[in-house]
Image (cartoon, coloured by chain):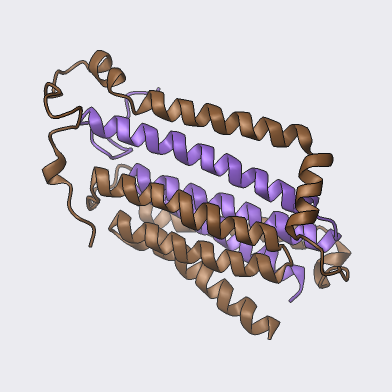
Amino acid sequence: MTIEWYIVLSSLLFAVGAIGILIRRSPVVILLCLELMLNAGNLALVAFSRMVGNQEGQVFALVVMVIAACEVVVGLGLIVAIFRRRLPLDVDELRELRG
Amino acid sequence: MEEVLFFAAALGALGGAIGVIALRNPFYSVLALIVHLFSLAVLFLLLSAAFVAAAQVVVYAGAVMVLYVFVVAYVGGGEESAWEPIPGQRLLAPLFAAALFVELALAVLGSSLLALGTDGPKVGAGFGDPAAIGYLLLEKFLIPFEASSILLLLAAVGAVVLASKRGVAEGSAEPVQAPSSNGGRPSREEEVPAPR
């Protein structure tokens, strides 16, 4: 398969993740959609690294995985904290920070 | 053979992604994301990135998803209400995403990168294997490697601080928290439904 297919698939996955972030309201699912978008970025990085023929893009993909793990840890910590304060797990009701 | 694998993995990845955003129960969304991650690992293997594929399966589908499953089981998978704060949000979001997809595809495919239409250069068997990636991480990218380890440590400490009991006791304005006679656990545990 040519590299174009991978790039188009990666853009498609990114767009699907964006839909999810826009229409879902549970913070857990929004974090999952963030994972989708990060993984689409990873796919593009690895595809471009294959296209160029060196492995540095794969190191970038690994660093993105580390960032995603950090984001998950902090995000899930926030969700647990929200749950313990008996606040609603709904991003439309948690709007105190909105300007 | 490669085409068959690619289309199977692409269908799995796309189906998993759509499952994540379409399924009502967050627990099923997590399971759909696991399907998505496994399909992506197959795609990485097709792109001869063996180590990234292995890390994807072991770290993501193995460890991170277990964390998600635990949190979903803890907070309970409630169904979302159908109330829309912005009218027509569910119709506008796919339109926006379609525009985003077209824009991304145009930006990449119109970039006149000649190698986009090829399979990439011929690479040897050692391309993307753990030895090559480890060599790059410890030689050329040593400082980003160490910085990411510090970042992981900070995230772990941050999660402990965020989810600790103390923040709840001093921070909450309304004293809804029951006294911690039950070993520091919220007394709402009986409401957490077992994921089916």
Rendered view: B12 above or below B179: below
Q: Between B20 and B27, which is closer to the camera in this rendering?
A: B27
Q: Residue at x 43, y 53 (%)?
A: B65
Rendered view: A75 above or below B76: above
Give the number of callouts: 0
Residue B32 lies left or right of residue B174; in this view the side is: right
Residue A72, visible in the rendered structure: yes
Q: Which residue is farthest bottom?
A: B1
Q: Position of residue A46 (x, y in %)?
A: 72, 58
Q: In the rendered picture, chain A carries what hue?
A: purple
Q: Between A82 and B103, which is closer to the camera in this rendering?
A: A82
Residue A95 lies left or right of residue A87; in this view the side is: right
Q: Residue at x 16, y 18 (%)?
A: B174
Q: Which residue is farthest top?
A: B170
Rendered view: A27 above or below A48: above
Q: Residue at x 74, y 68 (%)?
A: A4
Residue A80 lies left or right of residue B188; in this view the side is: right
Residue B96, visible in the rendered structure: no
Q: Position of residue B24 (x, y in %)?
A: 29, 59
Q: Position of residue B14 (x, y in %)?
A: 51, 68
Which quadrant is the C terminus of chain B positioned in?
bottom left
Rendered view: B124 above or below B143: below
Q: Between A38 and B70, which is closer to the camera in this rendering?
A: B70
Q: Residue at x 28, y 23 (%)?
A: B165
Q: In the rendered picture, chain B carries what hue?
A: brown
Quarter where residue B176 is shown: top left
Residue B56 lies left or right of residue B126; in this view the side is: left
Which quadrant is the N terminus of chain B positioned in?
bottom right
